[in-house]
Image (cartoon, grey):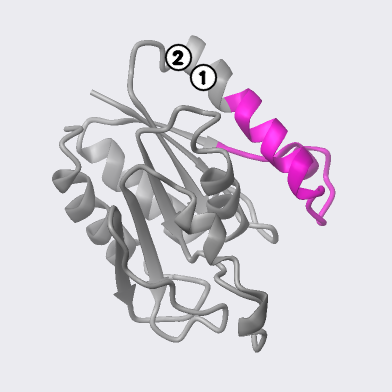
Amino acid sequence: MAGLVLGHGAGGGIGSADLVGAADAAGSLGLSVALVEQPYRVAGRRSPAPATQLDAAWASVVLQLRDGPLSGLPILTGGRSSGARVACRTATATDSVAVVCLAFPLHPPGRPEKSRLGELDAVRVPTLVVQGESDPFGMPPEAPKRTVVRIPGTHSLRSSAVVAAAVSDWLRTTGLL
């Protein structure tokens, strides 16, 4: 069927409610799921590495998964917050067939002039953004090949069930199942 590789946000690990919800939704539809911790978290550090290091580590892991346990499967990538940014920036390098963004940080809180929309716009494959209606990091716009699902909440997306429903509904529309 397909594989989904998800990464965490800058301040948390792979146990966040939204990542768990997305992973459960994908797994229940028959996708193979890998939750990936960035090396800085594995090393016990709290602060993320620079974007170039995050991207290189992510691409390396996704390619290893593609050559190993997910061999022969189309790969979807994604993550929450900074993990979503990494997945967007590396979508071409990892040959992702789709991207799942949970709580994409469109801009720093109160700084809309520091937009990161270019990272989302650069993705050329179907993309899902699940965003809290009151997210202080902003609300990305819909676009061709980009579906934005607004759910109750802020940047934390604490309801794994609501995230799971959004991811399940979208996955059913991708043609990958």
Q: How far across and how far down the image is residue 151, in percent?
A: 32, 76
Q: Is residue 117 left or right of residue 175?
A: right
Quarter of the image containing the C terminus? top left
Mark drawn on residue 176: none
Residue range of the region highlighted in magenta in the rendering: 36-61
Q: Is residue 110 left or right of residue 174?
A: right
What residue would you read off at disc 2?
69
Based on the picture, tell me whether residue 120 belongs to the magenta stretch: no
Q: Is residue 37 left or right of residue 44?
A: left
| Residue nearest the observer in this picture, 1 or 146 | 146
Q: Amino acid at mark 2?
A: Pro
Q: Residue at x 65, y 82 (%)?
A: 113
Relative to 80, say whether 116 is above or below.
below
Say which quarter of the image contains residue 81: bottom right
| Residue nearest the observer in this picture, 70 or 13 | 70
Total labels drawn: 2
| Residue nearest the observer in this picture, 73 or 15 | 73
Q: Secondary structure at mark 1?
A: helix
Relative to 66, say whether 3 is above or below.
below
Say which quarter of the image contains residue 147: bottom left
**Marks 1/2: CA distance?**
6 Å
What residue would you read off at disc 1?
65
| Residue nearest the observer in this picture, 57 or 144 | 144
